Image (cartoon, coloured by chain):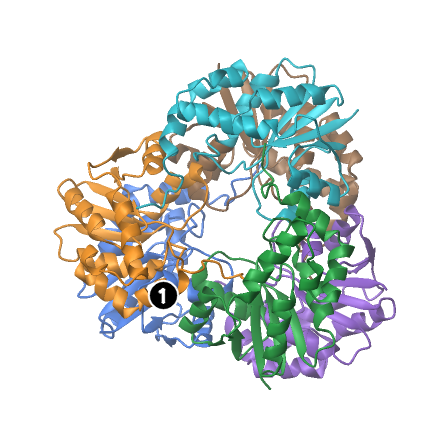
Chain colours: A brown, B cyan, C green, D purple, E orange, F blue
């Protein structure tokens, strides 16, 4: 049995993530999806709460032939302990998947195997694009799995991102 | 569809928790198991990491006819924001289950429905008992579901609890 | 113009505090009441929120011939920076009032004048006594100014302290 | 009796804030002025400490026919619990006043009534303008109530903002 | 070249620590003395600041034939990341020395070699004893190296411990 | 005996720092080098851990006729308590050295003597330059003392900075 770990912010979970999960599914039996910056929400870059992101991931992956765990990972803002933090919050895993250079570096310095994919940084580009289209009433729904669009509608996610995008600080005035 | 929320430290997940989950299963379609004090581990009172507790819960509930989510909840040490913190980390829920008076109070002050059970505080007693037996080489395995015992063995959980029980502070000397 | 600073947890603000404020009023023109452990609430030792304590203090001192400021001070859990923390949160003051030995020591090491009173530690004893009577349905009202009793009633403070007194941790089970 | 809540950073408290308070005064009996980012000071954007801002607000509003409370609110950097945090630090309020879109969103998602004014974002523009004039020896005094100018002079606020404006980090070199 | 790591709170650095350092000196070329709970001071259990403890250690070991580093380690209150935290704050080391069971466990789970000594827990007993004698005007000086006694006198350490010993909380009253 | 304090991030310790230390050595007997942002590492701006920076400083200053202490200072992100924080972590010092305007301001407001040098901000410029050359395979070695270059090579510092420079956040995707 092999268990993999895939970290992302999933703001929101989109087709780029989904394609990545499908590829990882060919290599592992179980997959932990680590939800990064779990403590952040209601900002332009991190509009959704960890709980909302758990819903998106769980509903989008429910029919896959893969045991998945969606695990929120709060920011500690200390790179030097980040791998230990992730390991303590997650079921044990043998291999990490990431296209983020810092994540790759941190895992490798800690002796954890990391695999990258040719779709380098597609996820990141796509996350920014999805949020941009949400703000501008563009077609964001074609970029996410259908169950994710449902979650976004239920929580008025588009209304939220449009309102907070002018300002990300609540101490203002 | 009704979703419930059940908070515990699950150190470890034992028969008392399991019985509680079985009863809740009669009332809800989905259940979030909030893993409290997720940031704590390797102490007498909190021997297991959040990741280890996710494994215990997931393996013990896998055959139940109930959709479950195991969600780590880190301590914020501010009771006044605790309900909001839980709500942000968890898929949305309609009813909370707890036998802990403080938890009941906090949810009620926030307007969340809470249900208690007649097995008042059995879970807490049982958690203390299980950890006590682990420390003293007693029969703790009969108090936990079989898959939990397997997880504890895999991670040398008994060895850990016996070693840390003399001292819970790492700044000592 | 002289401004004094008087730190307490005010859980709740009681006759011992009130008497102390009356005496301080003879020596200063303005008084800052620093509400310690402002981030704590809903526990046996700290049942009331900072906001509730501001209400108690403001209503109880409104008729005194003294300009007062009620300022919440969150715990930093670092004694070495505590005086700087207090000074940054409070209008500038010339003299501190306290009967707590640690507070006295910290201010003196920082070169701040501290005055103590003969009613040594009466406040602390009285705080414990008030909370004990609340828990046991005793006569706590005679130990607090009338406006404080009103605030406690409005927020069901006695119900709260009775419920949380069994347990001060929300990660339980 | 109606109590309102108005959040700002008040860096410093200026005519835009003052005008807003005057308008709110027509609608409520008491007003809590929440001092946001209370833990920040000595930076270009947040030059003044919470204590200094309490002084500005208190002196500027002392003659108004309105009971006011100046309450420091430290940043928690978690939007999802921000409303609960504010509510725990403040006397209970029925209506919040803000022109900041994020603040409006957070209060509304939490079910708190929020009122906005036509003077949309004037406060924010004005705060930036005041600090800019302070840095460049311009006429900032006409933009703030007279008692605020006095406080700024007492603490050498202009000297401070001119010195720290080159650099906002103390770990430099 | 071998570098060792020895963690303690050093409240204060005493003969038990000193003897331990002497023995370690026979096995390594360089030794890092990690000062645990570096953020704590002015309490019964942690009377001295990290800076004061650096002075004690540096002066007491200056004549030893051993390169030493005194490195403050702040508490993170998360055992699962503690080893990574220590490793990031310290020059790289090959072997850790400790008689504290939790520390031994944490290092071993992280794959770091740990050596214990037959003088099991003498340091801990001795730390408590030294602080007890300081509080009660007993002979504590014979339990610490002479340069440590000098540091304690310079900072009025005995006066401090006697004053704070009644109370370790600054939010009191 | 005079002891000085010199704060920097030392990312890495370079010739600008070294020259500054040489000048300070003419004025003091002992020097504390405070390693700022000690909790930060593996970013473009803060590539090295506190422990790695201790090694650089210690090896580079070992032959100087000056007693030095390298003390990590973690960020508290509260300017108002920063001087107290530094003082609690460091052996007592009489004079601080800095060319950073904020640091100068904070020390002066706290009544600590600060000395600046004509080589204003050379250190900061040089730190940015060294890291830039590391990223671009330029000649960075001529800008740092030889022992620092050795430390950087041992830990594959150039590989690290090149990998993390694309991205400083680990919650990405």
Percent x, y of residue D51: 60, 71
Whether residue B42 is visible here, answered yes or no, is yes
Q: Secondary structure at mark 1?
A: helix
**Which residue, as the protein is rendered here, is positioned at the far right?**
D26
Which of the 4 image quadrants contains residue C149?
A: bottom right
Between B115 and D106, which is closer to the camera in this rendering? B115
- In the rendered structure, the residue with mark 1 lies on which chain? E
Which of the 4 image quadrants contains residue C89?
A: bottom right
Which of the 4 image quadrants contains residue D91?
A: bottom right
**Where E42 sits versus C90, above or below?**
above
Horizontal side of A75 relative to E145 (left or right) equals: right
Decide: few, some or many residues near mark 1? Use Cα within 10 Å; few <14, some 14-19, many ≥20.
Answer: many
Horizontal side of B13 relative to B100 (left or right) equals: left
Which residue sits at x=23%, y=36%? E116
Whether residue A117 is visible here, answered yes or no, is no
Which residue sits at x=53%, y=67%? C86
Which residue sits at x=70%, y=48%? C160
**Where B73 sits versus A63, above or below?**
below
Between D29 and C35, which is closer to the camera in this rendering? C35
**Where B117 sits versus C8, above or below?**
above
Q: Quadrant of the N terminus of chain F?
A: bottom left
Percent x, y of residue C90: 58, 71
Between E112 and C163, which is closer to the camera in this rendering? C163
Percent x, y of residue B66: 69, 18
Which residue sits at x=65%, y=53%? C133
**Which residue, as the protein is rendered here, is positioned at the far bottom?**
C1
Percent x, y of residue C109: 40, 71
Q: Quadrant of the C terminus of chain F?
A: top right
**Where A60 sits versus F134, above or below?**
above
Q: Which residue is mark 1?
A: E160
């Amino acid at each position: 049995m092999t268990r993999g770990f895939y970290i992302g912010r999933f703001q929101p979970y989109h087709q780029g993530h989904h394609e990545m999960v499908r590829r990882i599914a060919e290599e592992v039996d179980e997959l932990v999806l680590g939800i990064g910056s779990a403590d952040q929400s209601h900002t332009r870059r991190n509009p959704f709460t960890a709980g909302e992101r758990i819903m998106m991931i769980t509903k989008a992956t429910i029919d896959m032939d893969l045991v998945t765990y969606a695990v929120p990972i709060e920011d500690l803002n200390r790179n030097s302990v980040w791998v230990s933090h992730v390991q303590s919050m997650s079921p044990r895993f043998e291999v990490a998947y990431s296209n983020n250079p810092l994540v790759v570096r941190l895992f490798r310095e800690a002796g954890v195997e990391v695999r990258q994919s040719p779709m380098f940084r597609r996820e990141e580009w796509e996350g920014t694009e999805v949020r941009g289209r949400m703000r501008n009433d563009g077609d964001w729904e074609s970029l996410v799995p259908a169950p994710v669009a449902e979650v976004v509608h239920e929580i008025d996610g588009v209304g939220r991102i449009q309102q907070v995008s002018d300002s990300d600080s609540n101490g203002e005035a």
